[in-house]
Structure formats: structure tokens, C-alpha cells
Image (cartoon, rainbow, N blue to C red):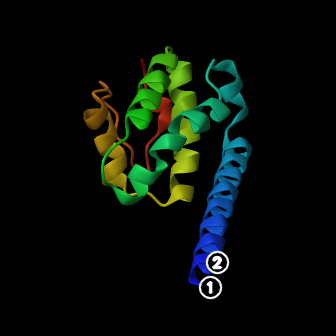
Amino acid sequence: MAAVLSRSSLSLNKVGCALLMMICFLVIIITCPAEVESAAITCSAVVTRITSCIGYVQRGGAVTPACCDSLKSLNDEAKTTADLQAACRCLTALIPSVSPNPSLINSLPDKCGIPFPYRYSPSLDCSTLTR
């Protein structure tokens, strides 16, 4: 009986996680302003890149190589100021919905060896970021 309950709970956790990611994606699509279209980077690309980091920013522990690789790719893809600002707007829309620890978010550039001078805060003004 316990094994059946455990399997059911695991399935519900997977469904819940998938549902949360879908809701986050919809929130991003709805809240990203139209001017993001001028940037080469899209919100869906940002969401895809950062998915592997969500567990770390929620619970801590070790940062996975997949998370660091994804963040490095995202940083490389944000070649222009418009790209950087678009990625920032997507991230600031997504971050509250995953209930992260802000200090863990801000530790990622250093832990992954990514030179990135900006730090997340709920009041971050993405329009001030430049490349």
C-alpha cells in the first residue's frame, strides 16, 4: 500500500511540476512587453535555458553542470543590449512564480564562472541594463 501511495505522490509531483512550468510560461508570455520582439532572444528561449536551475534557486545544494551550461548559453545569446533587457524582463516575470531564494539566484554567476555584473532584486529595472 505504501509503495502505491509513494508512486502516486511521485506522479502527482511530476504533474504539479509540469503544471507549474506551464503556468510560469504563460505568465511570461502575458507579461512580456511587445518591445521584446525587437530582441533576438525570446521568453520561451529564456524559460528553456533556466529550467535546469529552478531546483537550485529554490532549495540550494550543488549547482548542476546543466544549469551552468544553460546560463552560459543564455549569456552568450544575449549579445545586444536589447537581448539582455529582453532576457531580464522574462526572468523578472518568471522568478516570483518559482518562489526562489534571491541570494541563491545572485550566487549563480559566480558559481558558474559567468562574468555578469547585474544582480537580481524585485525592483530591478531591466531598461538600465546594457551590453
Q: Residue 4 has which mark?
A: 2
Disc 1 marks which amino acid? Met
Asked whether, in this view, residue 13 is left or right of residue 19, the answer is left
Q: CA distance from mark 1 to mark 2?
A: 5 Å
Disc 2 marks which amino acid? Val
Q: Residue furthest bottom?
A: 1
Asked whether, in this view, residue 78 is left or right of residue 12, the answer is left
- Quarter in which the C terminus is drawn: top left
Residue at horizontal 30%, vertical 53%? 61
Q: Quadrant of residue 4?
A: bottom right
Whether residue 49 appears in this view of the structure is: yes
Question: From what the image shows, is residue 40 above or below residue 58?
Answer: above
- Quarter in which the N terminus is drawn: bottom right
Given contact means CB atoms under 8 Å apart, are the residues at marks 1 and 2 in contact? Answer: yes
Q: For mark 2, does the 10 Å Cα neighbourhood hold few (<14), some (14 to 19), or many (20 or more) residues?
A: few
Q: Position of residue 74 (x, y in %)?
A: 49, 25
Q: Position of residue 99 (x, y in %)?
A: 48, 61
Secondary structure under the numbered disc 2 in the rendered image: helix
Residue at horizontal 43%, vertical 22%? 130
Q: Position of residue 50 (x, y in %)?
A: 51, 39
Q: Residue furthest top?
A: 79
Secondary structure under the numbered disc 1 in the rendered image: loop
Q: For mark 1, does the 10 Å Cα neighbourhood hold few (<14), some (14 to 19), or many (20 or more) residues?
A: few
Q: Which residue is mark 1?
A: 1
Asked whether, in this view, residue 126 is left or right of residue 101, the answer is right
